[in-house]
């Protein structure tokens, strides 16, 4: 028998009796009486479906505390409705750590100086993520009446020195390839990261079902998890050679030792082991290959828009550095060839 939407059945193994529950994301679980589709069942079902959205766990924590405000925020449209799934996962992780450490504190009494001290204890990149997350939480708290002011309003994002993730050099890529031959899992991982110019979270979800045949040749269909941008990326001959040498019957090209798709952190840990085995420095990360591919495009004369068509960047801000550096190097070489030294 097909159950109403969001209804799940649970059978007690002791007496074989079935119990039915309404379970919706962000809502508390509600037990439903009687048999599915019966008048009493449907009356309770309709009441539960139209009931208020209550933060899960709100009854077990102090009203007005950090834990209570975080629970309400995570259950709100402000959290679910405005950001991508990847951003939601990142912010949820930060807020869960924030709630675990400071959940009993009254939210209304958190001073700006304390927020500043908390951010100062984080590395620069992490501090930026924490600031935007806590600012969104505090703005929500002001709107809901838990605070009169936003304690993060005067806090400025710290400037991050350097260019972020290290951009792999050609020599580093060649060293990795020399250690991990075609046909190995590490070589497949590097080829997918470099030749598609995608993030790790998108690479670990790629599979043969995403390959499309077009008149111009095969392409890889990608819908970026972070941005939702859809891309058709040409499968370059170098990537095709690696894919052909590592056949797989799984839904994803990359799988763990047990045949399951990689999670983001598990993949990063494995890639770290593969780079260590190749004798590469710690600065060589999976994300650095995305930057290396963008650099490669720029060095070969591709415009910013052409690079974005491959990488899926939403703005030119990140790519300007690559095109400027490539143009400077090209102009310097041209100047050298035109200069006669007597």
Image (cartoon, rainbow, N blue to C red):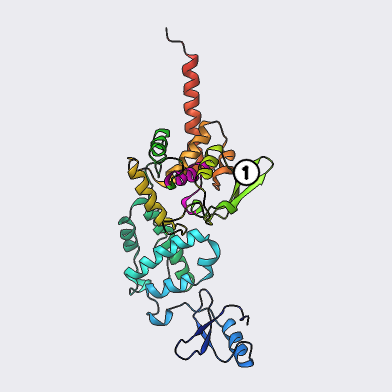
Indicate the quadrant where residue 288 lies. top left
Q: Position of residue 168 (x, y in %)?
A: 41, 38
Quick one: which residue is furthest to the top in this view? 342
At x 51% / y 90%, what residue is drawn?
A: 17
Magenta residues span 186-201
Indicate the quadrant where residue 278 lies. top left
Quick one: which residue is furthest to the right in this view? 215
At x 42% / y 79%, what residue is drawn?
A: 57
Q: Is residue 272 above or below residue 334?
A: below
Image quarter in which the C terminus is found: top left
Q: Is residue 329 above or below residue 252?
A: above
Q: Is residue 28 visible?
A: yes
| Front-most of residues 317 and 326 | 326
Q: Is residue 202 above or below residue 59?
A: above
Residue 51 lies in the magenta-colored region = no
What predominant SS class does the magenta segment belong to? helix
Q: Position of residue 66 (x, y in %)?
A: 38, 72
Q: Is residue 146 visible?
A: no
Q: Position of residue 77 (x, y in %)?
A: 54, 69
Q: Which residue is mark 1?
A: 218
At x 51% / y 71%, what residue is drawn?
A: 76
């Amino acid at each position: 028998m097909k159950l109403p939407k969001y209804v799940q059945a649970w059978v007690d193994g002791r007496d074989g009796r079935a119990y039915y529950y309404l379970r919706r994301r962000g809502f508390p679980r509600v037990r439903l009486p009687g048999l599915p589709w019966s008048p009493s069942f449907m009356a309770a079902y309709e009441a539960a479906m139209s009931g208020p959205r209550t933060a899960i766990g709100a009854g077990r924590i102090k009203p007005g505390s950090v834990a209570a405000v975080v629970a309400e925020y995570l259950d709100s449209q402000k959290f679910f409705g405005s950001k991508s799934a990847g951003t939601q996962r990142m912010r949820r992780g930060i807020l869960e750590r924030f709630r675990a450490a400071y959940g009993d504190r009254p939210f209304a009494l958190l001073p700006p100086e304390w927020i500043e001290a908390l951010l100062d204890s984080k590395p620069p990149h992490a501090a930026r993520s924490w600031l935007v997350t806590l600012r969104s939480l505090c703005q929500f708290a002001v709107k809901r009446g838990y605070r009169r002011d936003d304690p993060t309003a005067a806090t400025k994002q710290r400037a991050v020195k350097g260019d972020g993730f290290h951009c792999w050099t050609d020599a580093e890529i060649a060293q990795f390839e020399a250690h991990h031959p075609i046909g190995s899992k590490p070589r497949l991982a590097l080829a997918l990261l470099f030749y598609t110019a995608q993030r790790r979270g998108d690479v670990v979800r790629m599979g043969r079902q995403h390959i499309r045949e077009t008149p111009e040749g095969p392409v890889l269909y990608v819908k970026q998890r972070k941005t939702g941008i859809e891309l058709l990326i040409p499968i370059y001959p170098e990537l095709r050679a690696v894919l052909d040498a590592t056949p797989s019957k799984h839904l994803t090209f990359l799988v763990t030792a047990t045949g399951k798709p990689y999670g983001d952190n598990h993949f990063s840990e494995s890639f770290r082991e593969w780079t260590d085995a190749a004798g590469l420095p710690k600065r060589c990360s999976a994300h650095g290959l995305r930057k290396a591919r963008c650099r490669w495009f720029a060095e070969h004369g591709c415009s910013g828009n052409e690079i974005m068509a491959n990488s899926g960047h939403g703005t030119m801000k990140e790519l300007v550095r690559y095109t400027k550096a490539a143009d400077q190097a090209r102009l310097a070489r041209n100047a050298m060839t035109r200069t006669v030294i007597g």
